[in-house]
Amino acid sequence: MVTVPKEWVERLNLKKGDLVSTELDEGSLVITPTTSRHEAHSRTIDIDQLKDQRFLDLAITASYIQGNDVTRVFSSSNKMEPRHRQMVRQTIEGIMGVEVSEDYSDHVDLINLIDPAKFSLLETIERFSATSAAVLRDAVTALDAGDSALAKDAFARGADSTKTYRLMMRLAFQAAKSRQLREEMSLDDVSQVIVMTIATRELGRIAYYSMWVGQHVAALTQRPDRDYVSVVQRMAKATAEMQSLALKALLSRDIASANAVFLKMPQVRQLYESGFKLPASYEEKNAYRLSLILRDIRGIAGYAVALADDAVLGIFA
C-alpha cells in the first residue's frame, strides 16, 4: 500500500485500490499509475489581441505543439465575427487531428483527437525524412525533364508535410512531459527526447528547402543547360546520401554513419561553387531561380550535417 498526497490523487483521477508501479530513477522513487492516463491540457487565445491570420496561425500552432488537447479561441469583446471563425478554420486545415468541438457566439473550442500513445516518434521521424527526400528527388527529376507539373506536385507534397512536422514536435513535447508516454514510445529518457526534438527541427528545415526546390523549378520559364542540370543532380544525390546516413546515425546510434556525413560536405561545397561558374545566358528571373535551387540544396546538406551532429550528441549522451 502506498499513501500519496490527496491533491496528487485528485489530479491523476486515482481511487483507493488502484494499482501503481514503483521504480528507482537516478536516485528518485517514481510512482506511476498502471492505467494509461494522459493528462489533458488547455490553452485560451484572445483573437481580438491578434493582428491577422498569421498571428492566429502562430498562436494555435504553438498551443498544439505544446501538447494542449483543447484550445479555446475567444473574443474579449464577447462576439466572434464571421471572419474570425473563417480564420480559425483556415488555421486548423494545416494541423493534423484538430477539429472544432464547440462553436458559440463568443468562442470556438478546438479539440485534438490524436492519442500520442498510438504513435512512435522514431517511426514518424523516419517517414517524414523519407517524404522530404522524395520531394527533392521529384523536384530534380522535374528540372531535368522540364516537367512543371511534377515540380508543382513536389512543392504541394512538401507543403502538406508541414502537418507531420507539427505532429512530431507535439509528440516530442508530450514525451518530454510524461515519463509514461516515453515508455510507450520506447524512448529511453528525457535526454533522448531532447535530441529527437532538435533532430526534428533539422528535418523540418530539410523538408522546407526540399519543398522550395520544387517551387523554384516550377517557376522556371527557360530550360537550364545540361551542365547546370548535371551539377544539381550530383548535389542532390550527395545531399540525399548525407540525409540518409544522418538519419541512420540518429536512429541506430551509428557513429560511422555520422562521420560519413561530415566527410561528404566538402563535395557538396565544391559542386555548389561550380554551379555558379557555369557559362549560361538566362533571363534575370530565371538566373535568380537557378541560384536559389543551388542554395536550397546546399541548405539541405548543411542541415544533414546538423542532423549528424544531433546523432553524435545522442550517441554520447
Image (spheres, rainbow, N blue to C red):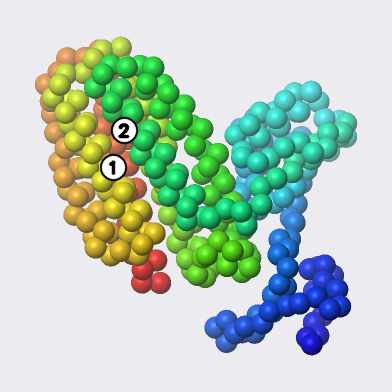
Q: Position of residue 222 (x, y in %)?
A: 26, 12
Check the image and report above or below for 113 versus 275.
below
Quarter occupied by residue 227 = top left
For the N terminus, the image quarter is bottom right
Q: Residues within 10 Å of mark 1 (few under 14, many from 20)?
A: many
Residue in the image at 61% along x and 38% along y: 95
Q: Position of residue 112 (x, y in %)?
A: 70, 45
Q: Amino acid under label 1?
A: Ala
Residue 278 visible: yes
Q: Amino acid under label 2?
A: Arg
- Checking the image for residue 59, the label placed there is none
Q: Are marks 1 and 2 in contact (CB under 8 Å)?
A: yes
Per the image, the residue denoted by label 1 is 240
Q: Residues within 10 Å of mark 2 (few under 14, many from 20)?
A: many
Per the image, the residue denoted by label 2 is 137
Q: Secondary structure at mark 1?
A: helix
Quarter occupied by residue 11 = bottom right
Q: Position of residue 280 (x, y in %)?
A: 14, 18
User: Is 224 displayed left or right of 220 in the figure?
Assistant: left
Residue in the image at 39% along x and 30% along y: 212
